Image (spheres, grey):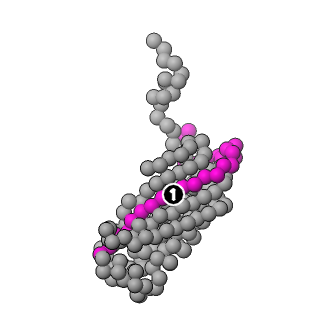
Amino acid sequence: MARSPSKAKAKTKPALTHIGASGEARMVDVSEKPATERLAVAEGRVIMTRATLDLIRSGNAKKGDVLGTARIAGIMAAKRTSELIPLCHPLALSKVTLDIEPNDKLPGCLVRAAVKVTGPTGVEMEALTAVSVACLTIYDMIKAVERGVRIEGIHLVEKKGGKSGHYRA
């Protein structure tokens, strides 16, 4: 019995968009895609001792304002994602916000980035890059007082716009 095309297609694994027919890496052609408003939100955590968190809160870290520096680093990283991730498109981002919340329960900092663009491709990589670099900056600024700091749980929280629609973790 022959399968209908829709059933056969449903069982096919989705193709990796950055791999060509011969297995070579390639940049996806987005020239035919409509420009739509797109948003991505990502987050991660920097886990540390309560004493180190208190040092950050007090503003007495040897290298200066940890949270302010990490916030700027994350925003700058989002804008330069295509220079860091080889197959990402350079995008004219319309908004990048980076929030860092000290959290006593972790103890540590919750880092959250939201990135927005109107364009033919999404900004998930920009949001993830912003969070990653902000977390690394926090680590860099406090490593002299605590070597056991951990960066954890970097992930996409939400994305809106484009053909695949709305996603929420």
Give the quarter of the image for residue 148. bottom left
Q: Which residue is mark 1?
A: 41
67 above or below 85? below
Q: From the top left corner, tell me how far across and down residue 147 is, in percent.
A: 31, 77
Give the quarter of the image for residue 107. bottom left
Q: In this view of the protein, can residue 61 be seen by the observer?
A: no
Q: Nearer the viewer, residue 158 or 125?
A: 158
Q: Amino acid at mark 1?
A: Val
Residue found 51% across the figure and 39% down from its top: 15
Q: Nearer the viewer, residue 56 or 84?
A: 56
Q: Is residue 39 magenta?
A: yes
19 above or below 46? above
Q: From the top left corner, tell me how far across and down residue 62 is, in percent.
A: 41, 87
Q: Is residue 158 magenta?
A: no
Residue found 45% across the figure and 74% down from its top: 137
The region drawn magenta spans 21-49
Q: Which residue ends up furthest to the front in the rendered image?
A: 104
